[in-house]
Image: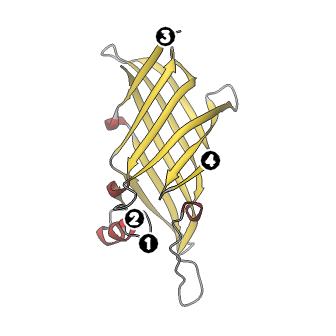
Amino acid sequence: MATTKWVLDPSHSEVTFKVKHMMISNVSGQFNKFDATVETEGEDFMTAKVTFTAATDSISTNNEQRDGHLKSPDFFDVANYPELKFVATKYENVDNDGSYDIYGDLTLHGVTKNVKLEAEFGGVIKDPWGNTRAGIVVSGKINRKDFGLSFHAVTEAGNVVLSDEVRVHVGLEFVKA
C-alpha cells in the first residue's frame, strides 16, 4: 500500500494544558508554535508514523510575568531546550468508536520518557473544496517532575502552589498532501 503524507492545518489545531494552582483552581496555557509530521499506509492511522514538536518559547498563559517564569530555567529553560517532542511508538484500539491509547517518547527539558496518552480519532473526510482531512484529539496527564520541571513553592500555610500533574489536550487536523 502507498505511503500517505499528511500536513498539519495549524488554523484548526491547538495545543493546550492545565495545571492546578494553589490546589483550588487551574491555570491554562497553550503553545502557539507547533508542528506534526504524519505518514500512514493509505489512510490507516493505526499505521501512522507521527512526530510532534512544539516551540517552548511559544508558551502562553495570558500572563506575561508568568510566561517569562515558565520560559526560565525554573521550568522550560527555553534557551537550552527550545522544543518539546513526541514520537509515537505504539497504538492500541480501546473500542470501536475511535478511541485509542497512544504510546510514545516525550522529550521535554532534555528528558525523554515513554508516556501513554488517550486519543480519539475523528476520522477521514473530504472537505467542500476537495481536500482529504483527518482529525485527532490527544489528551492525558504527565508529571512535570518526571521531566526535570521541578520548581516547587508552598504558601505560608503549607499548601502546594503548583501541582506536579499537568493535563494536556492536543487537537490536530491534517490535510492529505
Residue 163, how many percent across, how many down?
57, 69
Identified by mark 4, the residue type is Asn
Are dots 1 and 2 in contact, CB under 8 Å? Answer: yes
Q: Which residue is mark 3?
A: 2
Identified by mark 3, the residue type is Ala
Front one among 20 and 101? 101
Q: Relative to 150, does residue 117 appear above or below in the rendering? A: above
Are dots 3 and 1 in contact, CB under 8 Å? Answer: no
Q: Label 1 neighbourhood size at 10 Å, few (<14), some (14-19), many (20+)?
A: few
Q: CA distance from mark 3 to mark 1?
A: 46 Å
Q: Image quadrant for the C terminus? A: top left
Q: Relative to 130, does residue 36 appear above or below in the rendering? A: below
Identified by mark 2, the residue type is Asp
Going from N to C along the chain, the mark reached first, 4 or 1, is 1
Q: Which residue is mark 2?
A: 77
Q: Is residue 116 left or right of residue 13?
A: right
Q: CA distance from mark 1 to mark 2?
A: 7 Å
- Name which residue lies at 49% across and 55% down: 108
Instruction: Check disc 3 and report its element: helix, strand or loop.
Output: loop
Q: Label 2 neighbourhood size at 10 Å, few (<14), some (14-19), many (20+)?
A: some
Residue 77, how many percent across, how many down?
39, 64
Going from N to C along the chain, the mark reached first, 3 or 4, is 3
Are dots 4 and 1 in contact, CB under 8 Å? Answer: no
Q: Label 4 neighbourhood size at 10 Å, few (<14), some (14-19), many (20+)?
A: few
Q: Which residue is mark 1?
A: 74
Q: CA distance from mark 3 to mark 2?
A: 41 Å
Q: Which residue is mark 4?
A: 114
Going from N to C along the chain, the mark reached first, 3 or 2, is 3
